[in-house]
Amino acid sequence: MLKRGDILEVIISDLDEKGRGIAETKDRKILIYFVIPGDFVKVKITRVRRKIAYGSLIELKTPSKYRVKPKCRFFGQCGGCKLQNMDYHYQLYFKRKFVRRAFEGFNLDAHISKVDPSRPIWFYRNRMDYAVGQNLEVGLRKPEKWNEVVDIDECFLLSERGNELLNIFREFIRMREFKPFNTITREGFLRYLVLREGKFTSKRLVNIVTYLGEFRDIDELVKRMASSGATSIYWSINPRITDISFGEEIRKIHGEEYLREKIRDYVFNIHPNAFFQTNSYQAVKLIDYAAKLLDFRSNDVLLDLYCGVGLFGIALHSYVDRVIGLELDREAIKCAEINALENDARNVKLICGRAEDLVKHLKERINLAIVDPPRPGLHPKVIKALLKIEPREILYVSCNPNTMARDIALLSKKYKLDDKIRLIDMFPQTPHVEAMAKLVRR
């Protein structure tokens, strides 16, 4: 019987959706971070549950043939990119396997395409949210340890210029001895440094998230960051205990109103809090796939659910007669309106509100729908409404194959999968993958 503190040697046989290696014993499965299938390792058991145990790596006895040298010196501590030690093509193999496993779990007969790889696989992200730790560390959290931050001075996910801004911020807050916010004592000030950048525009937005209080010498920090390429600088205040990286009160301190990004021939203005696909390079492929997969007709009305700043609806507006975009975030809708005007997408109508409240009240006949929900998937009322309004085709886009498969199973009463599930790697060095499925009315 396994117990906490046990030390044993195991072979890693598989990988789970969180990027943890799986070892099988007579007792139960053991989940371990920073190992890959084929590794022979010595591990220490840290937790034991009824069917699963958790372990930490002590020693790599024999490496897997798919193991590579991690690029980042913080690998093994940081929870940012857990698959850096795995050959990139092997990463893609497992991402496809995760999606297949999710669809099989809901008894869906789906042909899963090979994953469309990302180019590049480093410095691909357009957003990073760096937490401020209790000793003024600035970086990413350790896996499964929300209160421990790894102090990072070099990250290979955003950009070299992003690293400059990260280190300017760290040096500044330490020199002036700022206090980090503590969610337990409800004391302190600094919470997050959010960096965003336009990969195709070279624009950079800095958003410093704090608790209530005075931001001492902020003008000096702004001056330093602006001189290192920040084109927009915001100060956001989150007065709640909730540990999130955006604020309720947002103040523009310097520069342009929004971050600007260009996808194909379309320019998008992005508010500090608004969602945008985190890999701009692969966002181009998302638009290209959507344009190829949907069967457009000139008089169609396209519903863009969870439209954000208008990426899909605006990029596809010329294929249809009208686009209706629904989005809960008011700032995102404001950006989408600006983007529609700037891109001369005059047939795009935008409505702010909850999708589950709005869809059922649409008066227009919807022919096509694109849904790109957050990770929890579609609200049950949205699924009910889609089944009622019966668009001819639905294009489902998701970074969570489990909730995607669940929703498609529920929609299967009136819809069937058409063609293969397209996979696009938006997140190299992590276990995540973007999936796109076309559904046609039966």
Image (cartoon, helix red, strand yellow):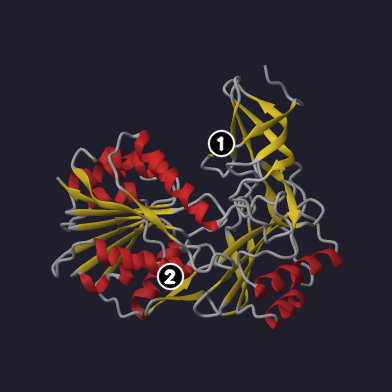
Q: CA distance from mark 2 to mark 1?
A: 47 Å
**Along the line of sight, the residue nearer the viewer: 135 or 439:** 439
The location of residue 254, given as percent across then percent down, is: 63, 78
Residue at the bottom extreme?
227
**Along the line of sight, the residue nearer the viewer: 338 or 419:** 419
Q: Amino acid at mark 2?
A: Cys
Q: From this viewpoint, is residue 438 visible?
A: no
**Along the line of sight, the residue nearer the viewer: 81 or 57:** 57
Q: Is residue 382 left or right of residue 13?
A: left
**Which residue is at a point 25% across and 41% down the rendered structure image?**
411
Q: Amino acid at mark 1?
A: Ser
The location of residue 72, given as percent across then percent down, is: 70, 60
Q: Residues within 10 Å of mark 2 (few under 14, many from 20)?
A: many
**Which residue is at a point 74% across and 72% down the rendered structure image?**
218
Q: From this viewpoint, is residue 325 visible?
A: yes
Q: Are marks 2 and 1 in contact (CB under 8 Å)?
A: no
Compared with 241, 247 (above or below) is below
- Between disc 2 and disc 1, the foreground one is 1
Q: Residues within 10 Å of mark 1 (few under 14, many from 20)?
A: some
**Which residue is at a point 41% across and 45% down the rendered structure image?**
99
Q: Which residue is mark 1?
A: 13
Q: N-terminal of the two: label 2 or label 1?
A: 1
Q: Secondary structure at mark 2?
A: helix
Tell me which corner region of the image, top left, top right, bottom left or bottom right, holds residue 51. Answer: top right
**Along the line of sight, the residue nearer the viewer: 298 or 9:** 9
**Which residue is at a point 51% across and 42% down the rendered structure image?**
17
Q: Quadrant of the N terminus?
A: top right
Compared with 98, 224 (above or below) is below
Q: Is residue 191 left or right of residue 391?
A: right
